[in-house]
Amino acid sequence: MLYKTVGLIGKPSHEATQDSLDELIAYLKNKGCEILLEESLATEMTDVDAPFANLVTIGKQADLAVVVGGDGSMLGAARVLSRFEIHVVGVNRGNLGFLTDISPDEISSQLDLIFAGETVVEQRFLLEVGVYRHEQLKSNNCAVNEVVLHHGKVAHMMEFEIYIDNQFVFSQRSDGLIVATPTGSTAYSLSGGGPIIMPRLDALTLVPMFPHTLSSRPIVVDANSEVSMRVSKVNSDSLQVSCDSHIVLPVLPGDEIRVRKSADTLALVHPKGYNYFNVLRSKLDWGSKLY
């Protein structure tokens, strides 16, 4: 695929990110691409001959977005860019980098593959969540990794019921519940004891957080199901729903949180040779082949 307009997104005031952005700009100019810089970089890159734009404009006008940073940077951009027909790739300047898999030392060689069309493109689905009070929508947002119902106080239990497609599943006393996508199965869900799910599976994971019963275990359900969390009225009033740990929606006792698969998908691009299990072995320090 020929990418004519490329958006560059990165963490401001980060020296390593700046180095990668400088390399990307030189590479893209050599390719004859139009460049759009995300507006948060405006104070750092005053000497660059390229226009600045917000994420919505980049999503509308660019063919490719390159996110320089860690998975957090990718998540923030992905929630917006998933609404548009744009390919997204990440350069890892963070820690683990499950979503940003291009090494800073291999930017040119990896982009050569991408511009030559030698790519693996994955469609990663998102979740949309709504908080309902007396059947009225009070707030909503979306998540790439997970939606988490939790207490506003640390180590504080709550009571709630779970329904899947309006069928009662269980009631629980715990610190909350993680509803994770396959993309998010290697994030917060994994630290909570949830399973790793291959990205192409159409499934969700429900992971209880410190449940007050030994029989409570993670559940994998069809991603086309609607998951409903109905909060008991006996709870205190400092409850929250978090989206990718970035966005917080307030929840009151008696509220209902509805989670379903979004119609939007993130077109995540990897250079040829990408292998999901190689990523897992590298990031999670799994053993190598014995023979």
Image (cartoon, rainbow, N blue to C red):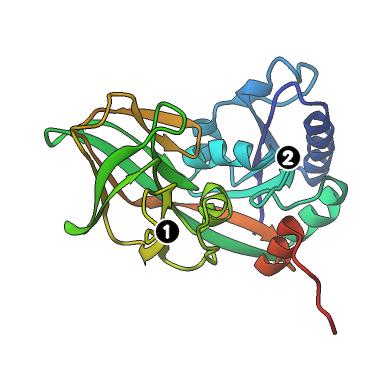
Nearest to the observer: residue 214 or residue 61: 214
* Residue type, numbered disc 1: Thr
Is residue 229 in view from this perspective? no
Nearest to the observer: residue 277 or residue 188: 188
User: In the rendering, at what x and y percent does residue 236 appear?
Assistant: 27, 26
- Residue 248 vertical placement versus 165 (above, below): above
Nearest to the observer: residue 176 or residue 9: 176
> Split into 4 quadrants, where in the image is the N terminus?
bottom right
Please name the residue shown 35% across and 45% down the image: 128
> Few, some or many C-alpha atoms within 10 Å of disc 1 (few <14, some 14-19, many ≥20)?
many
* Residue type, numbered disc 2: Gly
Residue 95 falls in image quadrant: top right
Q: Residue furthest right?
A: 105
Q: Nearer the viewer, mark 2 or mark 1?
A: 1
Query: Which residue is the site of mark 2?
Result: 94
Q: Kindly identify which numbered label has been placed on residue 205.
A: 1
> Split into 4 quadrants, where in the image is the C terminus?
bottom right
- Residue 34 vertical placement versus 271 (above, below): above
Please name the residue shown 42% across and 26% down the image: 153
Nearest to the observer: residue 24 or residue 177: 177
User: In the rendering, at what x and y percent does residue 148 appear?
Assistant: 41, 42
Label 2, secondary structure: give it: loop
Label 1, secondary structure: give it: strand
**Labelled pair 2, 1 in contact (Cβ < 8 Å):** no
Q: Kindly identify which numbered label has been placed on residue 222.
A: none
Please name the residue shown 68% across and 40% down the image: 70
Q: Earlier in the sequence, mark 2 or mark 1?
A: 2
